[in-house]
Image: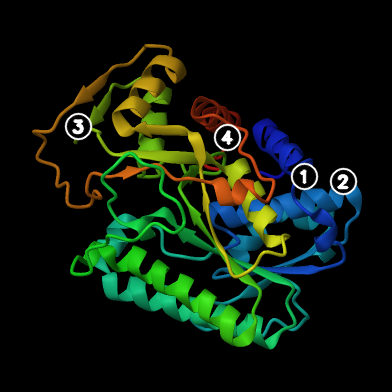
Amino acid sequence: MWLENKIFHEDLEYITNQEFIQWRRLQNKTVFITGGTGLIGFYVIDSLLFYNRLYHANIRVVALVRNYAKARDQFKSQLNENPDMLTFVEGAIEDIPAVGMEINYILHAASPTDSSYFLEKPVETIQTTLCGMWNVLELARKNPIEGMVYLSSMEVYGPNRDEEPVSESHASCLDTMSARSSYPESKRMCENLCASYYKEYQVPVSCIRLTQTFGPGIRYDDQRIFAMLLRCAMEEKDIELLTEGKTKRSYLYLADAATAILTVLTSVNYGQVYNAANEETYCSIKEMADLVASQIAKSSIEVIVNTHSDTKTDKFLPELKMNLSVDWLKNLGWTPHFSLANAFERTMKSLTDNTGGNL
């Protein structure tokens, strides 16, 4: 969508204006990014290219992609504007091909994200996640990199049950005998691999535990709860919840996620892990549904709780309370900007402004 979409353009302007990101560290450097065609990778790549556009920083991006033709089509406008600043390497994280140039920074954002896949293919989930992490860390070890960030997940904490803020030192309570734990357990192991490579080989890597993140770029048919709520608002259909919606968590708008990632990437505090969330967005699914119905849909729809539905609910996580503390990330100067209502409003506007259905 590059700069044609007004909301996305505004987001890029916001990201590139944040002084808590140490942009000077990225000048004349090469950043290797996995998962570049995914939602977060796409946002970070475009932020770097937009910064180049504004300040001629000569930041070169090398993106690992599974489908070269798809990637070129997705970044067509960016390539037309400045083809020398974006290079694609076709391959998979399970077997990374030779990059062919010096790498200075790495963002490892590639990962399975579909919860139904975790249930249906738990072995493959673990294998892809761990093998990919190992390969990326080996790439980092063999190159004189200056910094690396691994995108982990809030799910590593397991189904926390109380309302107290969850700091990075909080113990995990995952059920290791649940196949659904294949995703968060493999993420936990990847974090430990990062810590081990930092200690044994001095690879300058840190991890970010992202909360649920959304914004411009989500597919209209995305199956996650925030997308379902948006569709109901846009189609003026009542919201039907298949649980009581008691699970509570924080959320994060994509532009805030991008600034968090770039803040950690350009800091010198490696060997750390950081939660990334907007603490002000902490709410239950039912409260979020009510917000969408009243503020986004302007009370044109209602929220219906239907716990008697025949739909299987085993794909849902157990009820949890995930009130992430972000004090450590704020100590680096980072602060989130967009409220939950802002996130929904901007995401919906980006979808209605975009004729392609997804961005």
334 left or right, relative to 208: right
To which residue does mark 4 refer? 355
To which residue does mark 3 refer? 244
Q: Which mark is residue 54?
A: 2
In-front residue for pair 85/267: 267
Q: Residue at x 85, y 57 (%)?
A: 24
Quarter occupied by residue 224: top left
N-terminal label among 1 and 2: 1
How far apart are labels 1 and 2 at the CA level?
Answer: 9 Å
Q: Position of residue 154 (x, y in %)?
A: 41, 54
Residue type, mark 2 in image: Leu
N-terminal label among 1 and 4: 1
Q: Which mark is residue 138?
A: none
Q: Residue at x 36, y 35 (%)?
A: 228
Q: Is residue 209 visible?
A: yes
In-front residue for pair 126/347: 126
The reply to whether discs 3 and 1 touch (Cβ–Cβ < 8 Å) is: no
Task: Check the image and report above or below for 144 versus 338.
Answer: below
N-terminal label among 2 and 4: 2
* Element class at badge 2: helix
Q: Position of residue 157 (x, y in %)?
A: 35, 57
* Element class at badge 4: loop
Q: Position of residue 235 (x, y in %)?
A: 38, 24
Q: How many marks?
A: 4
Q: Position of residue 317 (x, y in %)?
A: 25, 50
N-terminal label among 3 and 1: 1
Residue type, mark 3 in image: Glu
How far apart are labels 3 and 1 at the CA level?
Answer: 40 Å
To which residue does mark 1 refer? 16
